[in-house]
């Protein structure tokens, strides 16, 4: 696996070694040993899987705070998404900065997102399946979110009228949110 640093410390693009032939391909999508050798020690406890059926579906920006903050390893196994990680740690040098990476079934890239970040993605194709590992179980009382179009963050999602859940439509702007980081 190759671990590619981004502009934000701790947010890393993971490119697995892919071995293909006339039958298809094989790859390791997760290897505790490879991650530890690269300096990342995560104990993932839950896998999540979502399907978005329509291009332009936006999920996020979500996070869990406090003792239930989550690190994530995310990937797209069907279709493609623009995946976004936002630094929500108020004392970080990169507070309010974000990284966007295209993840797709074709490029097989993954994004490693540490605790203290908001996360979201927008589908670039119909039928996008998204998988992710988290290092903390889901805790409804500790979940939070930021409005996708927060002008303070100015994220370029590549869409102006995404398909949103009612929950995501009503998320607060960062200035009104309690991120707890």
Image (cartoon, rainbow, N blue to C red):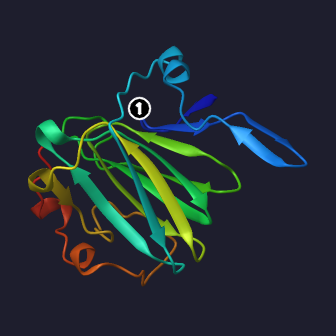
Tell me where residue 114 sits by quadrant.
Answer: top left
Q: Considering depth in this image, is 32 or 155 the residue closer to the camera?
A: 32
Horizontal arrangement in the rendering, residue 112 relative to residue 87 (left or right): right
Give the residue displayed 63% in from the left and 34% down from the top: 28
Give the residue displayed 12% in from the left and 51% down from the top: 142
Q: Residues within 10 Å of mark 1 (few under 14, many from 20)?
A: few
Residue lying furthest right: 22
- Which residue is identified by label 1? 10
Residue lying furthest front: 23
Tell me where residue 175 sits by quadrant.
Answer: bottom left
Q: Residue 5, how many percent across, how many down?
A: 53, 32
Horizontal arrangement in the rendering, residue 69 relative to residue 39 (left or right): left
From this view, report whether residue 149 is shown above or below residue 135. Answer: below
Q: Residue 149, how many percent across, how many down?
A: 32, 71
Residue 72 visible in the shown view: yes
Give the residue displayed 53% in from the left and 33% down from the top: 30
Residue 156 visible in the shown view: no
Q: Secondary structure at mark 1?
A: loop
Question: What is the total number of numbered labels drawn onto the structure image?
Answer: 1
From this view, report whether residue 170 is shown above or below residue 73. Answer: below
User: Which quarter of the rendered picture does the C terminus lie within?
Assistant: top left
Q: Residue 176, how many percent across, how many down?
A: 10, 63
Residue lying furthest bottom: 161
Give the residue displayed 46% in from the left and 18% down from the top: 39
User: Which quarter of the rendered picture does the N terminus lie within?
Assistant: top right
Tell me where residue 2 sits by quadrant.
Answer: top right
Q: Residue 16, how many percent across, how many down?
A: 65, 36
């Amino acid at each position: 696996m190759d671990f590619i640093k981004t502009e934000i410390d701790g947010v890393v693009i993971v490119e697995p070694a892919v071995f293909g032939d006339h039958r298809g391909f094989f790859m390791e999508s997760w290897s505790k040993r490879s991650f530890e050798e690269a300096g990342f020690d995560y104990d993932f406890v839950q896998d999540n899987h979502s399907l978005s059926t329509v291009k332009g579906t936006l999920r996020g920006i979500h996070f869990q705070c406090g003792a239930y903050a989550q690190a994530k390893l995310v990937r797209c196994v069907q279709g493609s998404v623009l995946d976004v990680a936002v630094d929500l740690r108020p004392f970080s040098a990169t507070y309010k900065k974000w990284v966007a990476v295209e993840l797709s079934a074709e490029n097989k890239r993954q994004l490693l997102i540490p605790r203290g970040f908001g996360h979201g993605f927008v589908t670039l194709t119909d039928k996008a399946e998204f998988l992710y590992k988290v290092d903390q179980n889901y805790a409804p009382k500790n979940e939070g979110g930021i409005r996708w179009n927060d002008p303070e963050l100015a994220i370029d999602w590549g869409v102006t009228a995404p398909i949103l859940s009612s929950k995501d439509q009503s998320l607060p702007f960062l200035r009104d949110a309690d991120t707890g980081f």
